Amino acid sequence: MRDTYLDTSKAVLIFLVVLGHFLERMVGWSDPVAHTVLGTIYFVHMPAFIFISGMLFKDKNWMKNILFFISLYIPFQILFPAFDAIWTGTFQINWNLFERPYWILWYLLGMMVWTALTHFLIKTKFAVWIALILALCIGLSPWNNYQYSIGRIFTFLSFFVIGAVYGKAIIQNIRSIRYAECFGLLILFGIVSFVYLSQINQFWLYGSLSYQQLKVSAFDGTLMRLGCMAISSLGIVTIFAVIKLFQSRFLKLGTNTLPVYLLHGFVVIFISKYWKLDSHILIEIIVCIGLSMMTCWILQQQFFDMLLRKMSLWLMKPIAKLGLK
């Protein structure tokens, strides 16, 4: 039996993912109001989504799940650049194509690595501590953290591991708190205020660059990353507290987040190429909200989920014949 509370949470988070990408492509970070909205979204949506992904981690199926993500990552890593080439006119299939996941596809690569690492980490008593240390230490790396999305993958690893180890207990405690919604809204107000006053560099929220690339010392960078992770942790609490207000709505969207996540990029790219927003910032944000709602409503249809499942068969069908569980 599905957890409707979790499905509602996933629905809200996938909407924020789509909204964030529409805002980035069509509005950008330069306006203080847009920066505040985007910054708040990015502090919360991916850490919370990764936390839920950790909760849904099943160790007995870890290898099969990795292969499923590979089965989608490889074709979409070709499809997205090919789609973008309609406007850029440049597309070439070679090994370099796989050095850097295309835009939103870093999450699929992340799921492969998080699943593999968590399989081994949960066998220790220090899984969360190891993940946290890796998240802080990846910023010390001397190489380009964009390559293979290693920066993002290790920065967000701890959220996946915490979800896998403590996720269910954390959500139960949040749901049992009386007036949790009020506390959640207060925390949300605090995060919004912090982003508005600080106008924080968005690359801290992406988790994709090293401290050297962010032009800070190792000590300051470690503190900054730890601070960002602490704010994101509060954001996760906020999401699960405020979700109580929705009372099991948007369940269809919550059960079909994968097609929305993978396919909305094509919609965002297409619309942003032909529609340039040039009006009051609040109107631009409202337009992006409307576009996000429409995109989520269309892509939540079961047809798109079935399409992805069929796409994965090029790898999953041979694997099934081998009897891999």
Image: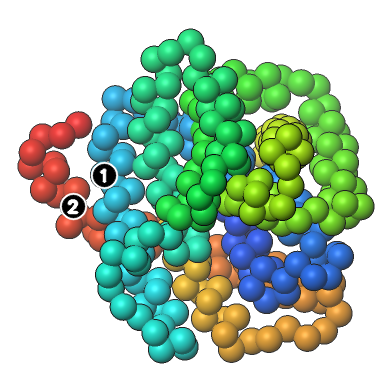
- Asked whether the beta carbons under mark 2 and mark 1 sit within 8 Å of each other, the answer is yes
Residue 56 seen anywhere in this rendered image of the structure: yes
Q: Position of residue 136 (x, y in %)?
A: 62, 33
Check disc 2: other Cα within 10 Å, few if <14, some if 14-19, many if 20+: some
**Depth order, front residue of 272/309:** 272
**Reading the chain from its start, which is encountered first: label 2 or label 1?**
1
Residue 38 appears left or right of 76: right
Residue 91 appears left or right of 134: left
User: What is the quadrant of the N terminus in the image?
Assistant: top left
**Depth order, front residue of 202/290:** 202
**Chosen colour scheme:** rainbow
Calculate the distance from the C-alpha at mark 2 to the C-alpha at mark 1: 8 Å
**Image-quadrant location for residue 10:** top right
**Depth order, front residue of 210/9:** 210
**Circle 1: element type:** helix
Q: Position of residue 291 (x, y in %)?
A: 63, 72
Q: Position of residue 297 (x, y in %)?
A: 54, 64
Q: Position of residue 223 (x, y in %)?
A: 75, 34
Q: Residue furthest top?
A: 125
Residue 162 seen anywhere in this rendered image of the structure: no
- Residue at image position (69%, 25%) is 175
Q: Measured along the vertical axis of the image, is residue 218 above or below residue 73?
A: above
User: What is the quadrant of the C terminus in the image?
Assistant: top left
Residue 75 appears left or right of 283: left
Q: Amino acid at mark 2?
A: Leu
Q: Which residue is mark 2?
A: 315
Q: Which residue is mark 1?
A: 67
Q: How many numbered tags mark residues here?
A: 2
